[in-house]
Amino acid sequence: MKIILISLLILLSLHAEKVLVLNSNNTIAKYKETVDSFSKEFKGPFKTMDVSKQKENTIKEYLYTEYPDTIYAVGAKAYQYAFEYLPEKNIFFSTIVNWKRLKRNEKSYGISNELHSSMNLTLIKSIFTDIEKIGIIYSKYTKDIVEDFQQSSQPLNIQIIPYKIEKNNIEEESFQTLINDVNAIFIIPDPILLAKQNVVKKLFQASKSKSTSIFAYHPVFINYGAVLSISIDNPTTGRQIAAMINNKAYNQSQYPAGTKVIFNKKAAIEHKIKFDPNITSLVNEVIE
């Protein structure tokens, strides 16, 4: 009986699902936080590989040798390797800006790096009740994000003012037309806008001169003077992916379950924008 039991255990181990976590760069905090949280939540064994420390041929050979059943790709670089060499496998992904630009198939599943537009706008309207017009700067790469915002804004009595930019003249942009027409601007992860730091600084300087508040998708913009940042919570994303793999929840994509909201009270006062006095109940952090 004991021999049979041992044989069964060996047989089960041979057929156990092989899971590989492919990390774009474990020294980057958002990736590390996500993987650490995944590790605590995931119920089975898994292997890890940091692709930032390896040459492409080494990564390719490792993927073919391991040939995992499921890959969790953290970051765009890891996903690109996973999809290029093992597109036939279940590939889960997270922590990728503008993930809809990825090459995907019916076995690609993931967590968006952006919150649903309705959640962003509901939070904004809850904090800044007088907001009526919000500008969004976009390009051909982020047109779908703007369209989502426009659709979600209608029930909240917010008007979204889209402002399209082009790569060939982004350096000459002053943004004055948009700034003069809105109460605030929401920065989305547009690659053309964010490619040039001087352009981002110009936007903040021009907005400050007109007391137009800026909201953003990432906390880094608080350092530039953004009044509010609404971002995903990386540890929650790691737990969410672990739950998807644990439960074999093969969905094309999900929105993140956790948020991190930072309110820059100092900037809000400077911009003279009215905000809810019970702000602490709506945000995770207040910068005085």
Image (cartoon, rainbow, N blue to C red):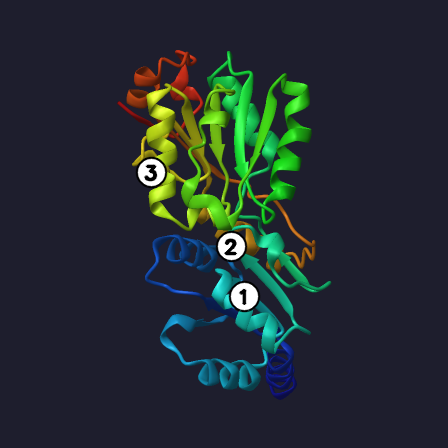
Secondary structure of the residue carrying tag 2 is loop
- Residue 272's spot in the image, x, y percent? 36, 13
- Disc 3 packing (10 Å; few <14; some 14–19; many ≥20): few
Horizontal side of residue 40 vs 68, given as left or right: left
**Looking at this rendering, what residue extends furthest in the right direction?**
106
- Between 181 and 15, the one nearer to me in the picture: 181
Residue name at image x 51 percent, y 54 percent: 96
User: Where does label 3 land, which residue?
Assistant: 201
Where disc 1 sits, the SS reads: helix
Distance from Cα at disc 1 to Cα at disc 2: 9 Å
Which dot marks residue 126?
Answer: none
Which of the two marks, 2 or 3, is nearer to us in this view? 3
Residue pointed to by mark 1: 79
**Badge 2 density bin: few <14, some 14–19, many ≥20, Cα 10 Å:** many
Name the residue beneath numbered marker 2. Answer: 96
| First reached walking from the N terminus: tag 2 or tag 3 | 2
Horizontal and vertical percent position of residue 104: 66, 63
Q: Give the spatial CA distance, label 1 vs label 3.
A: 31 Å
User: At x 61% / y 37%, what residue is drawn?
Assistant: 146
Asked if 100 appears above or below 179 in the picture, the reply is below
Q: Amino acid at mark 2?
A: Ile
Where disc 3 sits, the SS reads: helix
Query: For the point 62% across and 32% down, which residue is it?
Result: 149
Give the x, y percent position of residue 278.
41, 14
Q: Classify mark 1: residues with Cα within 10 Å, few (<14), some (14-19) or many (20+).
A: many
Residue type, mark 3 in image? Lys
- Could you say which quadrant of the image residue 279 lies in? top left
Labelled pair 1, 2 in contact (Cβ < 8 Å): yes
Give the mark nearer the N terminus: 1 vs 3.
1
Q: Amino acid at mark 1?
A: Tyr
Front residue (pair 34, 180): 180
